[in-house]
Image (cartoon, rainbow, N blue to C red):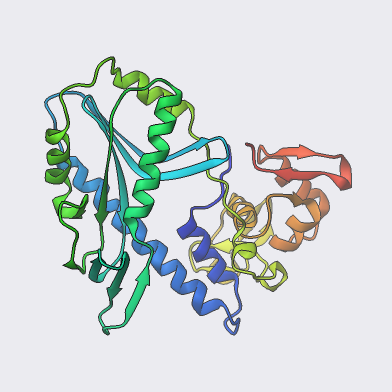
Amino acid sequence: MELRILSKMEGLERLAGRLPAAHSEKNYIQSEWHRAAAGYRGESRLASRMKEFHLEETFDMLWDVNLKLGNWPVQMDALLLTERCAIIIESKNISGKIHFDDNTGEFYRFDEEDVKTVMEDPRVQLNKHIRFLVAWFKARKITLPIRGLIVFTAKKCEFIAKPDEAPICKTYQLPETLLKIWTASPPKAPDVKLLKIKKTLLANQTPFRQTPLCKRYFIDPSELKPGVYCRCCQWYAMQRVRRSWQCPRCGERDSSAHVLAVREYFTLVSSELTNQEFRRFCGIKSRSVATRLLKELNLETTGELKARVYQLKS
């Protein structure tokens, strides 16, 4: 089993759970978690709607595409590959009344309480991603033209001012909008081999290295509540009992509960873990027990004995 850090949504949930109730950043982290959860639901709606998209010719869909060109990394929510073109799809979970102001170049929304929030224009991000992929394809002699589309996935979203002919739609409009973009593209591009392009993209995926959330949100890791999380009653107090973990609150037993704790540590605190830090974070008293549990996790190690450091595999 190869461990990975938690998703942004899961990480924020665990960070909020480990912060004391009176912590000054707890409410903010909870709001960040709710935003991430809403974004995840929006992406799920987008993926579900894509089941309605169909072409007579070959096409393929890639999700969460992470690529790098020199020191320039990008993350694309989705990439549709067809024999006519590649279409970058950006998912935006922004609710309220949406305004694109071409006179000023501003993008903003009004929420349900009519509060105005100026935000980054998603067209700028999409254009950057198109420019990136053009260069990335050119470096690999891939001749497939590139288009783009921004999909607003929030259920309560209303376009008040929208640019003419802009590559923008709502989730329910996705299949038809993609079809229009495909239809407007020239017939099959020369020398296009979709399977080869897909394999090249997948082979060059560059995993996104997330900054530990405590560092990102300027939270001292020592302020986090230690303990092993009980999935049953959401309490950080599972105890090591007869080579397993048991919750004193609800009686739940889970032999692998420490695995989540290790993933939490790498997500929230640091990319490096020592035996001492593992014991402190999980509330383990025995060094030998901690050593045995860490050895079972298939982690990369450097150093020997007390100076040993554990990391997630690259």
Query: Please, is residue 283 above or below residue 302 in the view?
Result: below
Is 166 left, or right, of 194 in this rendering?
left
User: Residue 109, image x and y in percent?
Assistant: 28, 72
Q: Nearer the viewer, residue 150 or 145?
A: 145
Residue 196 makes an appearance in the image = yes
Q: Nearer the viewer, residue 308 or 128?
A: 128
Residue ranking furthest to the front: 103
Residue placed at 61% from the left, 61% from the top? 246
User: Residue 125, image x and y in percent?
Assistant: 38, 52
Residue placed at 37% from the left, 68% from the top? 119
User: Residue 309, image x and y in percent?
Assistant: 78, 45
Q: How many marks?
A: 0
Is 227 left, or right, of 64 in this rendering?
right
Is 99 left, or right, of 140 in this rendering?
left
- State the image quarter where residue 311 is shown: top right
Residue placed at 25% from the left, 80% from the top? 112
